[in-house]
Amino acid sequence: MPTNDADLLTAYRPVMQYDSHEPYFADHAAAIANRPDNNLLTAKGVVLAAAESGQGLLARLGPDSYAGLVTRPTNTDCLKEVGSDYQLQAASMHSDPDIANKVHGIVARDGQGTRWLQYWFVMYYDDPGMLGFGTHEGDLEMIQLALGDDDTPVTAVYAHHRSGFRVAYDEVETEPLDGVAVPVVFSARGSHASMLRPGSQTEGSPVPDHNDAKGPRVRPDVVSLSETATPWVWWPGSWGGTKADSSLLGHLGIEANSPTAFTRHQAWSAPLQFAQACSVPSLPPVGQALTGSPSQPPPAPQASVVCRDGRLAVDIDASDAAAAGATQVVVSARPAGSSDPAVSRSVTLAHNATGTVTLPMTAAGAHDVHVVAVAPDGSSSETTTAG
């Protein structure tokens, strides 16, 4: 059993279970900072530097200075994602194996001498429920594991929106890998909240979080964080350029803001206090799904798919879902059997609730296509796999 910090971080790095519709995976922070044309901005919108194909912005970032720049960093600076097709941008960066499927790991210590294995997840974009509201550039999520005297986890904290859930480690769904019980994180569809179970969860969420456990299951590599090797982690700015129109509504989470610096999160500097502030959730036994929903979920749509002119044509009949109050359909595709992020489209249901949605083929051959109906309160149907 490993005992040093680096080996423990690697041994317990989590398995990420994605929803079938998820287009944004946990990647290296360079996915945002080094994507060509993304900008480093001041609060007033002044461009300090732009990422280029040969020179990204990550190497410029530090706690007290910008490499090659006179301007000093402030917590109102941000990395602005330039462009409108965030899925395409994220997919382009995810195609780089040095960027794809990474978690950022560090061992934190609290005032009582406990070591916490922290895993921070950076996603390119946040689109809660794939519904097109509450969206923001960049996303930063995390989990942390408290180690006992024998260097095995005793407590897990899964960050969830503005707080999180705290459980004993034997309540975490785990996967045995190399003799270690590795935690599984069910990344919520679109919002990326860290869920302890698949299914639909209303506890602690402004709208329900969903994970159908039908997407890829990936175990990312660890990017070990330190002031010398990764000074950009201590940069005080925001990982995205989205700002709420109202500071009060942004603070309450009603309007969206891009995530602030790693170091400005309570878990970073006070892991025990963060854990104590998190609630103990009501969970089904390990292996069972959450069933929470604010209302009766809509029926699942019917769907079939054919390839036409190099695109996927998905014929949908969501009549029953629309009659039950659903207003949106999310359609997603990825190459069959792949571990790639999905290409997803959210479509407003028309009066007849039938029609065809076209999606690009991201590779030759068969694709896995999934469809789900969503009601205005965020409740979601079961996921349909298109035939």
Image (cartoon, helix red, strand yellow):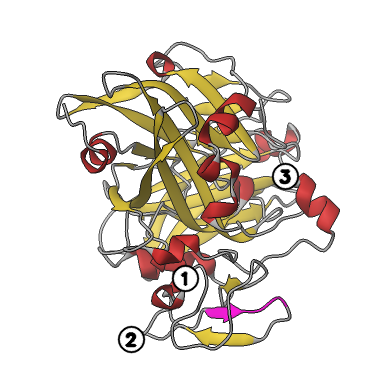
Q: Which residue occupies 63% across, 72% down?
A: 77
Read off the residue under disc 2: 54
Q: Most extreme residue toward the top, as rendered?
A: 285
Query: Label 3 amino acid?
Result: Thr
Say whether marks 1 and 3 touch (CB < 8 Å).
no
Q: Nearer the viewer, residue 59 or 372?
A: 59
Q: Position of residue 18 (x, y in %)?
A: 41, 41
- Rate crowding at label 2 as few (under 14), some (14 to 19) or many (20 or more) other CA atoms within 10 Å: few
Q: Which residues are magenta?
A: 39-43
Q: CA distance from mark 3 to mark 2?
A: 44 Å
Upstream in sequence: badge 3 or badge 2: 2
Position of the N terminus, as image quadrant, is top left
Is residue 3 visible in the rendered structure shown here?
yes
- Rate crowding at label 3 as few (under 14), some (14 to 19) or many (20 or more) other CA atoms within 10 Å: many
Read off the residue under disc 3: 327
- Rate crowding at label 1 as few (under 14), some (14 to 19) or many (20 or more) other CA atoms within 10 Å: many
Query: Label 2 amino acid?
Result: Gly
Number of numbered discs:
3
Residue 346 occupies quadrant:
bottom right
Q: Position of residue 80 (x, y in %)?
A: 58, 74
Q: Is residue 138 left or right of residue 45?
A: left
Q: Which residue occupies 31% across, 63% down?
A: 229
Q: Is residue 371 left or right of residue 257?
A: left
Q: CA distance from mark 1 to mark 3?
A: 45 Å
